[in-house]
Image (spheres, grey):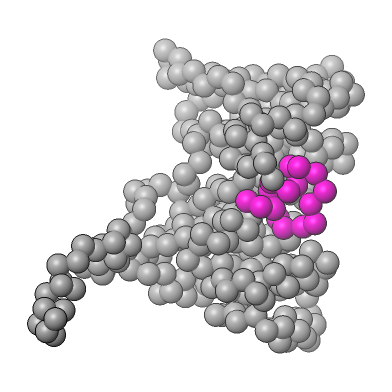
Amino acid sequence: MTEDDKTASDEDRAQTPAEAATAAGAAAGTRSGFVSLLGAPNAGKSTLVNQLVGTKVSIVTHKVQTTRALVRGIAIEDRTQIVFVDTPGVFEPKRRLDRAMVKTAWSGARDADVVLAIIDAERGLSEDVEAILDRLKTSQLPVVLLLNKVDRIQRDRLLGLTKDITERGIAFEKVFMISALNGSGCADLMAWLAGRLPPGPWYYPEDQITDLPIRQLAAEITREKLFLRLHQELPYASHVETELWQKRDDGSIRIEQTIFVERESQKKIVIGHKGETIKAIGQAARREIMEAAEETVHLFLFVKVRENWGDDPERYREMGLDFSS
């Protein structure tokens, strides 16, 4: 085969979908990609996603492992669409639900164009963080180190922590020192990501900020209010489902949600004395759901006991988790 034949053959070869997308993005001058956040529980992943997207797409509480499945928040920086993937915290799993969440976190990292390894600088190198760093060392993932909550730590300690982490043999592409809560350092991070992601068309419409269905987002909002109100009293094993989403003639929405707990004693905690607790949870959730839905909302909450719901395959499917974990 002559060189001319080879050239013609190369030109005739059909482009792969990835090559076609890159070419289309290059022609349009746009970039896009997925950026996964990976870290220990309560490292600030959900707070950071909300900060970078510019609005709330992921719930935030003081309770560890609040995020159970992948939540995507979508941001635009210049001509780059950045799809942030908030993942469950990575820790040593003990239960089936724990294993499913940790598996989901690592799968989200493997599928991303860039992985943001976020570490709570104030807390430092916990056992969970050490385990994550050990795995990243052999992962070949495109990793960026984010040291979060740097406004809560003295400079000398911060520099020592950074030196310790960066000398562990992990090929970090970049290191950023940020505060997810007040936004410090986030503009620099966004600008770097905008240039780092590959050329390609945008995955979502320009005005879309999350791929989470509104029914599921509403359930997540109620679960957040539940945890914020009862994080000391209520065990981790609780779950919220939107059972009804009904548009009424007057334009308002009737929403019925069920809070599932594992024991009768937990049901009493959620309801509270004369129903005061569940009323307060409902009021707080309704206000935020109304903002998200941009409609008047009538929210009705019910509490049911479902023993061992954490071993129910159907619940895992609804949360987007792998029951076989």
- 17 vs 234, left or right, is left
**183 versus 101 height, above or below:** below
Looking at the picture, how far across and down is residue 303, in whole percent? 75, 21
State left or right for residue 274 relative to residue 294: right
Specify the quadrant of the image occupied by residue 89. Answer: bottom right
> Is 98 or 155 nearer to us in this picture?
98
Q: Is residue 266 above or below residue 154?
A: above
Q: Residue 217 is drawn in which quadrant?
A: top right
Range shown magenta: 89-104
User: Looking at this view, is 43 or 277 the one in front?
Assistant: 43
| Residue 210 picture location, percent across and down | 48, 46
Please name the residue shown 56% across and 71% down the image.
141
Q: Position of residue 130 (x, y in %)?
A: 78, 71
In the shown orientation, is residue 201 left or right of residue 47?
A: left
Say which quarter of the image contains residue 218. Answer: top right
Q: Is residue 301 magenta?
A: no
Q: Is residue 118 left or right of residue 93?
A: left
Q: Is residue 132 above or below residue 257?
A: below
Res 62 visible: no
- Is 94 colored magenta in this rendering? yes
**What percent of the width, then of the height, locates residue 114?**
51, 68
Picture quarter with the N terminus: bottom left
Q: Is residue 274 above or below residue 220?
A: above
Answer yes or no: is residue 174 visible.
yes
Q: Residue at x 45, y 18 (%)?
A: 247
